[in-house]
Amino acid sequence: MTPEAGHRGVTTSSNDGDVATKETSFFERPEHHAAVCEGVAAGVLPLKFAYAGSAARTHDRLSREESYQSVTGAGALACKALLDLGHPLPRRIAEIGPGNGRHSIAVLTQVAGSAPAGVDYLALDYSESLMSRAQLNFAHDLPAVNFVPKQWDVETGPTSGIRDWRGADSGPLPVLFLGNTLGNLEDPVSALEHVLRSTEPGDTLVLGVTLPDESEEATEAPYHNEVFRSAALEPLLALGLDERLLHLDVWYDAPTHCVKGVVRLGAAVLINDIEFPAGHEVRCFLSRRFSVDGVRGLLRLAGWDPVAEYADPMAGHAVLTAVRPR
């Protein structure tokens, strides 16, 4: 998708490398623009818009931050979970929300013990822009893997994309859902149900989550930097809002085990002929933390049968596997 699709004529500065450039903010589709406008009006902006369109660039930069990787890690745990499925590396793997693909590439390489070959890999993501980045990274680092991208919004309903891709004789399929993506969704149980209804009996879900930290300061630390701020604000910049009017506050809400980010308007703004007053607030970021017992309960509510857990409390990560019942 090119910047011309939903281009709002807004620029943000980038400093990747030694030369600063100006990049245009844009939406992937007109319906994304409409949905972000609705989110601003409702005061709740789903986090998926911080990954799509020009926000794929800001997320890509954020994903390279060491502090952010500490939140979305669990690569070693995912490797162990895949190895315990009984295969050196499954011939077919599907992944929901692979981001820029860097984490996925590291997991596949570690499980295979070398650069894997002959693997069919299905990438399912809301953002076509981010999937394009993942496809380029796979082509560069793992050219022998057959990378197939399919657009899917896991929050809105099931997809036929997995069944269409896998064919009739593929056998049980591992479906990766890593990086605490589940914690970024508005309704985790509904999303897990949508995954269940998109798979076949006997398929295994490999689910990564971030565990709560006893220190609120340590939990908030990865989010207090300019790279995160740019990523969180990008959907609003694509609307044409002036960044100087956007005041972002990020904190850890201990009772709900959520990191929340709220933008407050510093002055009245006009969006689609609707005036929003100074002080209007929009929750633009949400990242839940889960206990292992809590995730196991969510999986059961969604119809999955939990099988195994791999937790590293010191690192703050866990991976659970669950099977769709036959």
Image: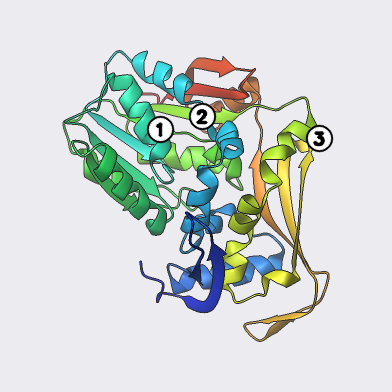
Q: CA distance from mark 2 to mark 3?
A: 22 Å
Q: Residues within 10 Å of mark 3 (few under 14, many from 20)?
A: few
Q: Which residue position holds label 1? A: 176
Expressed as whole percent of the image width and height from the top left, the position of residue 62 reads 55, 47
Expressed as whole percent of the image width and height from the top left, the position of residue 65 reads 56, 41
Nearest to the observer: residue 162 or residue 151:
151
Q: Residue at x 46, y 63 (%)?
A: 53
Nearest to the observer: residue 20 or residue 308:
20
Q: Is residue 130 above or below residue 216?
A: below
Expressed as whole percent of the image width and height from the top left, the position of residue 258 reads 72, 39
- Asked if residue 132 can be seen in this view, the reply is yes
The answer to which of marks 2 and 1 sits earlier in the sequence is: 1
Q: Which residue position holds label 3? A: 255
Q: CA distance from mark 3 to mark 1?
A: 29 Å
The answer to which of marks 2 and 3 sits earlier in the sequence is: 2
Expressed as whole percent of the image width and height from the top left, the position of residue 32 reads 50, 67
Contact check, label 2 and label 1, Cβ < 8 Å: yes
Q: Is residue 194 above or below residue 110?
A: below
Instruction: Locate residue 213: give its quadrant.
Output: top right
Left or right: residue 193 compared with residue 277:
left
Q: Amino acid at mark 2?
A: Gly
Instruction: Locate residue 50: give its quadrant.
Output: bottom right
Left or right: residue 92 compared with residue 308:
left
Q: Is residue 291 above or below residue 132?
A: above
